Amino acid sequence: DLAGAGSVTASLMVFVYGLTHGAEQGWTDTVTLALLGGSAVLLAAFVAIEQRAVAPLLPLRIFRVRTLAVANVVAAVVTSIAFSEFFVLTLYMQHVLGYSPLQTGAGFLAFALTIAVVSNVAQTLTTRFGPRLVLVTGLLIASAPLASFIRLPVNGHYATDLLPAFLINATGMALCFVPMTIAGLAGVERADAGIASGLLNTSRQVGGAVGLAVVSTIAATSQLGGGLAAKTAATNAFQSAFVVLTGLALAGAVISAVFLVPHKALDAEEEQFALAELAEEAA
């Protein structure tokens, strides 16, 4: 399916480039609108090609599995939050708090280690309670520290203003990753497992690109600099970005609660395949 592969790849590339261009030049810029419009045309062409292809790259029937469709939407939401909050918090720590890149990286270690630990717990919880409950719980937990970042102070301190929120947010995000992946693969026919996995990864990448484009636009409303006025303006912009990210987390929780099917015991083959995908992604 060379035509399908070419059209969808081109669509995604033009879409991401359009988002990047829009964040830099504005969303009403002629080139931005042309790029986004071109991406939509290429995506429509891809759908038309897949409907007629003898061996389609992405069989559209796969979207009849409601759990898969919802998991991909949530994957885009979760990844957009994860990419965006790291971006905004990095700017905050370096340009407002004055941290060096090395200090900033060390500050995020607490986040990474928490995810590594809690992910193992998330696997057990998902097996017992199903993806929906764990995913909704994770998004609700993650939304609390995101909401706390709306009040980030100009003279913030890592131990009081960042570390507790990092630990809670990382716990919530870790509870999202495992059930999100399992939901995206559960109920899919074995022959379509590779397609479902690729689709989930694509949703993650697109979600991350969209999220970064949005928060970049918000962050660009302030002038980063060393003076108090510049730091205050930057902090206000970062706070606005976290309003959007908090809303995304809550929207993801609602989508998961309403549209994901209730707990269904996963058979051993489904669970092992999903966990293998997680292990490969982590590696």
Image (cartoon, helix red, strand yellow):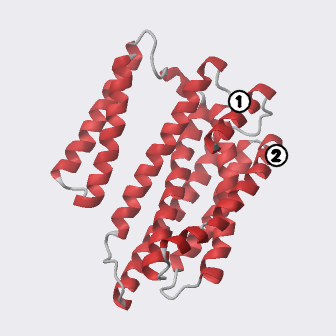
Q: Quadrant of residue 277?
A: top right
Question: Is 129 rendered above or below residue 60?
Answer: below
* Secondary-structure class at tag 2: helix
What's the residue at 44%, 72% (across, down)? 91
On residue 198, the disc is none
Label 2 packing within 10 angstroms: few (<14), some (14-19), many (20+): few
Question: In the figure, is residue 11 to the left or right of 238?
Answer: left
Which of the two discs, 1 and 2, sits closer to the camera?
1
Q: Which residue in the structure is indicated by mark 1?
A: 273
Q: Secondary structure at mark 1?
A: helix
Residue 215 at x, y percent in the picture: 40, 63
* Foreground of the two, 252 or 223: 223
Residue at screen point 37% across, 56% down:
213
In which quadrant of the rendered image does the C terminus lie? top right
Does residue 182 appear to the left or right of 199 in the view shown? right
| Residue located farthest toward the top when viewing the structure as drawn | 54
Q: Nearer the viewer, residue 211 or 64?
A: 211
Q: Do the numbered discs 1 and 2 sit on residues whose CB atoms are within 8 Å?
A: no
Q: Which mark is residue 124?
A: 2
In primary-sequence order, the first of circles 1 and 2 is 2
The amino acid type found where label 1 is placed reads: Phe
